Amino acid sequence: MLKIKGLHKSYPIGDSSLHVLKGIDLQVEEGEMVAIMGSSGSGKSTLLNIIGMLDEADEGEYILDGLPIENLNEKKAAVYRNKFLGFIFQSFNLINYKNALENVALPLYYQGMKRKERQEKALFHLGKVGLADWAQHLPKELSGGQNQRVAIARALAANPKLLLADEPTGALDTKTSHEIMAFIQQLNDEGKTILMVTHEEDIASMCKRIVRLRDGVIMEDAKVEQIRAEQYV
Amino acid sequence: MFDLDLWREIFQSINKNRTRSLLSGFTVTFAILLFAILFGISNGLQNTFEEAFKDDATNSIFIHSGTTTKAHKGLQAGRRIRFKNKDFDYVKEEFGDNIQFITARIYRNTPASFKNEQNTYDLRAVHPDHQFLEKTKLKEGRYINQNDINNKTKVVVIGRLVEEDLFLKTKALGKYLNLSGVQYKVVGIFTDDGGDTEERKIYTPVSTAQRLYGNNDYIDQISLTYNPEMNYDKAIAFGNQLTKSLKDRFSVAKNDQRAIRIRNMAEASKNVNQFSFVLGIIIFVIGFGTLIAGVVGISNIMIFIVKERTKEIGIRKALGASPRSIVSIILIESIIITAIAGYMGLLIGVGVLEWAGPALKPYFIKDPSVSTSLVIGATITIIIAGGIAGYFPAKRASKIKPIVALRND
């Protein structure tokens, strides 16, 4: 599903440069649910961004679903992101002047889907996260947990191969965090491959595999017994 | 471009971000409004000047005679100078190359009557060329012609208001008008842009008047227009030459200001022209400055808008928006706002000119208005400038890595 080999990334800081990723090798199979952990500055977000084609690696190989991701120009990256990837962000990143339904429908718009079809599909996904009744509400009229559910619905709408979540519970209280995690686990149960960055141990333990990063290298990569989030809800 | 969804996206963005849209539109509206008003006022000033000269040909020279004030060549002061037909012929022959139209004028004030209606009018005895000098417009019939001059026919051409006064609702053409007891045939009716006084005049052949009023060959005034191909300086020189030769002819001292007086419109025209030219430059500079201010304003706002939308752009890109769609959504939005705002400015500007126009007449501003093409041109300039100003930030925004844009919160 996902294959990364010898990935390097550094950021220029003034005259010198900061070497963030120092040769990452990672392989993720279909249906996995992986947590990438590490303290801040360990390079975990950078890794996720490169996987998400939001950022480019300086060096290394990246193959997504058999497709080598290289020499990306903006246009190609946009098409790949749209087709293969769904994003869930810590700060939700919904467009504030669009209602829930329109936000969910946006990736479908960029797929070139017809308006009516788009709205039906968006409503279906909103229903899946339990927000069908809130379709016409703006993000500011929804709670944090609801917003994150809208964002999840948006990530799912385009039916991506890989779901990327960057601290999806970072802005939420514990109870809401567990609700969101329950959703994500449910998606994984349905067969979605999920990659998640987090620094919270209890959230990571709800995944099936934990990859620990420190100073740009993988320290530990182990499968774990998944803790189900439903029991806390 | 005809992607309905794209337009829906744009109109939603405009509608949901009203303050932003209104602010950027306001700059453009204001610039176009000022532009329209400025040009309207300058046009109004120009109209006033044009009207002041509309009555008579702008290349006219009027020659009057008076009484000498200085003794010269053994002749005493106080001598009355009167032009005669031979003086008219002299001017015509001597300066023929420089003259376009020429006519003599004799003034009389005469009672006129038709049936029971009667009134007193200015009678002007003239040559056929007078029609062009005075810019007389014939409504019906004909003007005085050379045949009338040769045969001293008793014909008159009357003003529109003379016909109205005396002939009431009936047609004057072909009827006979009684001027101090002599019957004249009405051969033409005219109108004149010079106003009511001009339209209460009666024209008759110069030769007819000379025979009927004293049987002499005196002329009160010689009017002519100089060859329009001459520029102002040449025309002024021609006027001076004319003065000199006539003063010589009548043995008038060079510095005698009253004996022979020449009024040369070239002098006034030259001044007016220079004034209009300077006024034009001032207006052009101010108008251009207004436009530039508008362009700078819309450019700033575009940069601000792109900055404000950086995060939204990042989200859209993360969801699969191509750089092109980012640029087009921002550009088309700005073009729509500037176009609508520019049109509003145009409407308000034209409205203000319409509304304030009549009140401005005492300030030498008549019918202030702007040509639509000029204002549309200005609006298009601002739209293009706004487009260019928006294009570069939009292009840069479309190139921002989504991760950089998303971090920006």
Image (cartoon, coloured by chain):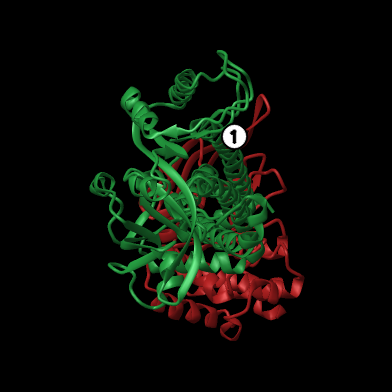
Instruction: Give x and y (percent) for residue A218.
Output: 60, 44
| Residue B101 vertical placement versus B302 (above, below) | above
Residue lying farthest to the front in this orientation: B214
Q: Report the front residue among B331 and A114.
A: B331
Q: Residue A94: image x %, image y %?
A: 60, 65
Q: Please provide percent x and percent y for residue B268.
A: 54, 34
Residue position for label 1? A10
Q: How many marks?
A: 1
Q: Is residue A211 visible?
A: no
For residue B23, side relative to residue A28 (left or right): right
- For the question of whether residue B131 can be seen, the reply is yes
Query: Which residue: 72% across, 47% down?
Result: A40
User: Could you tell me which chain the residue with mark 1 belongs to?
Assistant: A
Q: Nearer the viewer, residue B351 or B18?
A: B351
Residue B104 occupies quadrant: top left
Quadrant of the image occupied by residue B132: top left
Chain A colour as displayed: red
Chain B: its colour in the image is green
Judge whether B122 appears above or below B269 on screen.
below
- Identify which residue is drawn at 58% across, 75% down: A100
Image quarter where the C terminus of chain A lies is bottom right
